[in-house]
Image (tube, grey):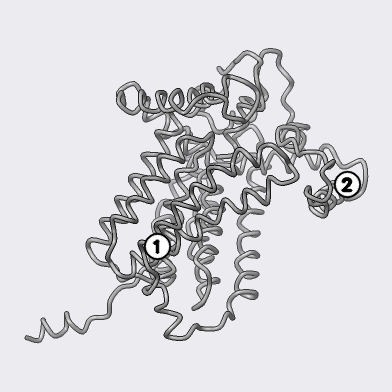
Amino acid sequence: MTVTTALQTAEPIYFDFALVRKALLYFGVVMLIIAPFSHDPIVVVVCGFMPYILVTIVDRPRMPSIILYYLLWVWVQAAARVLVAALDDESLGDGLYGSDVYRAFWYSMASLVVLAITFRITLGGLPWPSDEQLSEHRRWPPMMLFYIYLASAALSFVLAPLAALSGAISQPLLALGSLKYVVMFMLFANVLSTGSNLKLLLAVVLIEIVTGFTGLFSGFKTVFIVLLLAALSLRIVLRGINILAGIAVFVVLLGLGVFWTAVKSEYRGVATGYSDSQAVQSTLTDRASVLIGKAIRPGEIEWGAATDQLLRRIAYIDFFGAAIGVSETAPEPETFARWRDALEHVAKPRILFPEKAALDDTEIFLRYVREGSGEESCSGTSMWIRSIRPWLPSGTKERIRVESGSLSRKLMDRQD
């Protein structure tokens, strides 16, 4: 009787900031144990405890869950580079950009702390909602939300090609198309809190996965992010079924990410007609045949290589390190020229200034990262390939030679 009563009165475990903070503390302790065996023990310790520090700073009753996602995702991009160095049996300073990567890591950690403090100051005092507001999402009609989602998803599908027709209206149209994520969040909140209409949630997830794979970029992952944010915002009670569902979601997302990494080069070539543009020029049937063909023959996919490529793809901090070197070796010809250009571009909305030049991300990438990197230009070697050499396994860094080709199409990988 005593045991039964204790079990009945035990405090439930909620999926909230407090639980995430506790889990991240354990993660930091594990990194502390591993650190002495690494090339950069201090880096590993700081990287291991940084998520716990960030969550501790922003753990306020009304802090939006998107803040936690944003901070941890930026941290992952730095942490992935530490993991890559460990897999290559190197230190952070052994790559192409040398000690600049060390500096990029410390700058990233410092900036994350500053961002977390800023979020706490600006958002930490949000008022606590009333009891009626806290339970309002339970009264939202799930079937009506599903129909609204279908309408908003169709609208997003129609607006995407229209946005590509004119730079003056592209941003407003894309923002309008993103409203489907608001409806998606509302539906997920209702289903997760009430435990009913799970089939509607699964239908939305399936639709987003299928439509996400029909574009040029990894749009399929967004639905999982929205689902995670909804669960964190609701502070759902952790039960065995919820934990299993969370593990399943993680495994599916990781599997889809690895699959996309393995097939995206061939898929994008077919989708764009092997052109230099980022516009879809092939039929849906042709694009689907590539994906289905790969999916039904999983044995032809090099899953290990794709997983390694995905990890190195996430480790963006090399670009930051390269930009640091460029800034010091090639100073601006005019004081604050880059700040001036950036502010001028932002202050001129394209809908009012249609003649404003479009940003060339390839040109900007090369200007901020490649100049002054200390690597000579090699005829027949792609600059993009050279720029990602720090991510490649050490045994292949000096063996990669490719013919000159479309740089803009290859640089689309940076936008996933």
* Left or right of residue 118: residue 352: right
* Left or right of residue 21: residue 313: right
The residue indicated by pointer 1 is 144
Q: Image quadrant of residue 71?
A: bottom right
Residue 159 x/y as whole percent: 59, 44
Furthest toward the left, the residue is 1
Secondary element at image label 2:
helix
Residue at the image position 44 percent from the left and 51 percent from the top: 150
Q: Is residue 229 above or below residue 307?
A: below
The residue type indicated by label 1 comes to Met
Label 2: how many Cα within 10 Å (few below 14, some 14–19, many 20+): few
Residue at the image position 38 percent from the left and 49 percent from the top: 205
Q: Nearer the viewer, residue 89 or 323?
A: 323
Q: Nearer the viewer, residue 265 or 276?
A: 276
Q: Which numbered disc covers residue 372?
A: none
Residue 158 x/y as whole percent: 56, 42
Label 1: how many Cα within 10 Å (few below 14, some 14–19, many 20+): few
Q: Is residue 271 above or below residue 42?
A: above
Mark 2 or 1: in front is 1
The residue indicated by pointer 2 is 337
Q: Earlier in the sequence, mark 2 or mark 1?
A: 1
Furthest toward the right, the residue is 334
Q: Image quadrant of residue 301?
A: top left
The residue type indicated by label 2 comes to Ala
Q: Nearer the viewer, residue 76 or 104?
A: 76
Residue 138 visible at all: yes
Q: How many marks?
A: 2
Q: In the rendered image, which quarter contains the C terminus?
A: top right
Q: Is residue 300 above or below residue 83?
A: above
